Image (tube, grey):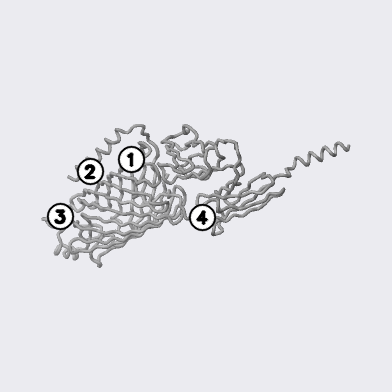
Amino acid sequence: MNKTILHSLIVTFFAFNVHAQDGEWVEWIADAQFSYNQIDNLNLSAFSDDQENDHQISFTALLGRIYQLNGTSRFHILADLSKANFDDFNKMNNTELGLNLGFRHKFGLGFHKPYLQVNFGYKDTEFSAKSWDRNAYDAYIELGKHFSDKITASISYAYTQMDGKPWMTVLPEISSEVFDQNYWQSALIVDYLIYDDWLISANYRYRNGDLTSACTPDNVVKVLANNTVNAITTDDIFGGCVYQISGETHTLSTGLSYAISRHSGLNFSYEYLEGNAGTLNYDSSNIQLSYNYRY
Amino acid sequence: MKINIIFYFFVIIFSCNLYAANLNITVVNQKQQVIENAVIYINEAIPNLTKNSVIIDQLDKEFIPYVTVVQKGSSVNFPNNDEIRHQVYSFSKAKQFEIPLYNGKSSDPIIFNNTGSIAMACNIHDWMSAYIYVVDTDKFVITDKSGNGIIKNIPNGSYEILVWHPKLKGNVKTTAQQVTILNKDNNLDFQITQKPMMKAWRAPRSTNRRGY
């Protein structure tokens, strides 16, 4: 059903494009990001005795093009390639290949007019530990507005459907397809310009649906004793089991950006996640420093 | 011989403009920081000003220059030297206009018949902004990166000098200074109060934010 909705949205997206008159391919999208991440509780374990931390270095490159329909509407299509390497947990190293289609509409003429952004994405992610491989479809909608020359805010909703692969069966009555997941998330983002070249941002995100957690065999027993897990399999990365459970998370993040030039910037962010599923409580954090370039 | 001396005397006298001088101006803000792109001009209404044709370019998704001064009645062309399309508009009281989405040369120049400031922007690229300031005089200058500007060849007399800047807080009249020009160059320092206005953000951020 969800897949049908996604496909219908994509068909609508292209049908709209067909009616475009005086449209023209305009800007190229060529973005790159080099980032360093320090992740606490990388395995999102609910138990403090087996939470793992690690450092990650990643590189992302995006290449695409924008099709300008008129003065207020445009489409984009882009492909992205991302490579992430972990310091300790090498089997988490992954390569991601994605395709993203988007439509942006501004409701009129002027800096303060609100905009609507709709994106559809596909991502194929391959890990060193093959059991974690997955592909994902997502639909994203964002409504935003410049409230003043300093403040911009947006709200967004995203629905993601992930397909993994079956792996080693741990319990016959429970699926081993841990990465077959569905979830949605909604976010509120506020950007505030401190100076012309310094910007801070705050972001709250609520996520509801399936989530992934990995822990040692001893703790898996505790999870299974009191909770209903949707899927479980053995895990090469963290040495125990990885399971899927339905729950919700709240994420707060704050960022500081510095404009090096018109085309490049340094971005720092801190993110804290707290969530629960059944009787389990989760928390994790991520500090990211990135250099971004836009053609 | 005497005729020659008298002749050369008059040549020297008239080759030097004894009735004009320059005004050297520096503009700083309330924090004593020098202000670039401040428009300094003599507050006078000269009838039948020359109507110039001025160009404001669009390159690398920016208006160039950021601040332009034009004499009342002048026209401005907005050639688009990017290989993409722009849509230029202004809602300012002194001039409202819109140039629909275009690339290459814009169709017709825009004529500015009213004095005052005009803020303009591109509807496609929100960070693109620039200003036109329309004056009633041919005696004006825009300050450089050091906050300096020179208004040249001002005839002897008393004048009111005004300063305008996109971030100027309050009315331009509050900046007024009187100056008397009498055969020699003068220096004039302005301190203006700026409001905390920002130019929209352009630099890239996380690749997860895909708002193209």
> In the picture, which quadrant includes the N terminus of chain A?
top left
Residue labelled with disc 3: A169
Q: Which label sits in the foreground, 3 or 4?
A: 4
Q: Chain of mark 1?
A: A
Rendered view: A278 above or below A117: below
From the viewer's side, name the closer residue of A26 and B40.
Answer: B40
> In the picture, which quadrant includes the C terminus of chain A?
top left
From the viewer's side, name the closer residue of A38 and A198.
Answer: A198
Q: Marks 1 and 4, how far apart in space?
A: 42 Å
Q: Marks 1 and 2, how far apart in space?
A: 17 Å
Q: Which label sits in the foreground, 1 or 3?
A: 1
From the viewer's side, name the closer residue of A197 and B194.
Answer: B194
Q: Residue B187 in the image: x percent, y percent?
A: 65, 53
Badge 1 and badge 3 in a common chain: yes
Of callouts 1 and 3, the N-terminal one: 1
The amino acid pointed to by label 4 is Gln
Q: Marks 2 and 4, how far apart in space?
A: 50 Å
Q: Residue at x 85, y 37 (%)?
A: B4
Q: Chain of mark 4?
A: B
Residue labelled with disc 1: A77
Badge 3 and badge 4 in a common chain: no
For residue B194, which numbered disc appears in the image?
4
From the viewer's side, name the closer residue of B186 and A74.
Answer: B186
Numbered disc 1: secondary structure:
strand
Q: Residue A211 in the image: x percent, y percent?
A: 22, 56
Q: Which label sits in the foreground, 2 or 3?
A: 2
Residue labelled with disc 2: A6
Give the residue at the far left of this rendering.
Answer: A173
The amino acid pointed to by label 1 is Ile
Q: Residue B131 in the image: x percent, y percent?
A: 50, 45
